Amino acid sequence: MFTALLSGLGLCLSLIAAPGAQNVFLLRQGIRGAGASRRPAIMLAAVCLASDIALISAGVGGFGVVIESAPWVFDAARWAGVLFLAGYGLLAGWRAVRGGGETIDVRPAEPVVREETHGQTLTITTAPPRAATALLPAVLACLAITWLNPHTYLDTVLLLGSVSTTYGDARWFFAAGAILGSAAWFAFLTFAARYAARWLRSPLSWRVLDAAIAVVMLGLATLLALG
């Protein structure tokens, strides 16, 4: 059982640590919100982890057989992924060319105090810091990047699912190890993004980052289109 757990952990980390659209997206969102609340970055990491849990469980539970018998699923995900990644890459390229003047303050966010005078009464209210990112659009983009990528099904459902069968009754320990590896990786990305934000305090550094993201996203879209 322990061997199955370690095997699942190691295989998942070897698959998930490869440069990809999901990792690039999480890093950018985490870096962008580094000067504000950690909640958006943690929420996005939780969305990715929940997706992995569902996919790993489906693969180990035998859903990979269904996926293999329905090749149209890959074709649909493939072209949807091409369009989404290409669009995201073009937007990143546009930000790199145009420049958004985006900067980061990595100091902890502090409440804003507002004083209002009503007659002889002084009212002091505390306004929460403005959210660094719009959470709902980021969550939807994260779900699209995760579920519209056919490699997600190849690696997480088919590969992990097929390897898990070699462990017989211990295959769910293999699944637990894979889920543990996924959780560890997304936690690392969340931490790494806040650390990397220290070097992204100027608009120029953001333009360089967006240019790199554009290259990665458009490269992945091209690879998907070529099959």
Image (cartoon, rainbow, N blue to C red):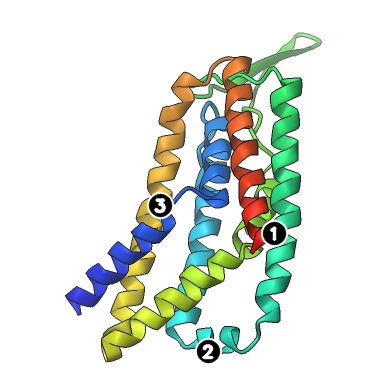
The residue labelled by disc 1 is 225
- Amino acid found under the numbered disc labelled 3: Ala
Depicted 224 relative to depicted 192: above or below: below
Q: Residue at x 38, y 66 (%)?
A: 179
- Give the number of callouts: 3
| Residue 111 pos. (x, y %) | 57, 23
Considering the image in quadrants, where does the N terminus appear?
Answer: bottom left
Residue at image position (28%, 91%) is 169
Residue 2 vertical placement versus 107 (above, below):
below
Q: Say what secondary structure mark 2 lies in.
A: helix
Viewer-nearest residue: 64 or 51: 64
Residue at the front extreme? Answer: 226
Q: Quadrant of the C terminus?
A: bottom right
| Residue count near mark 1 (Cα–Cα under 10 Å), binned few <14, some 14–19, many ≥20 | few
Measured in 3D between alpha carbons, the distance from the residue under mark 2 to the one under mark 1, in whole angstroms, is 25 Å
Q: Residue at x 61, y 51 (%)?
A: 220
Could you say which quadrant of the image residue 95 lies in?
top right
Residue 17 numbered mark, or none: 3
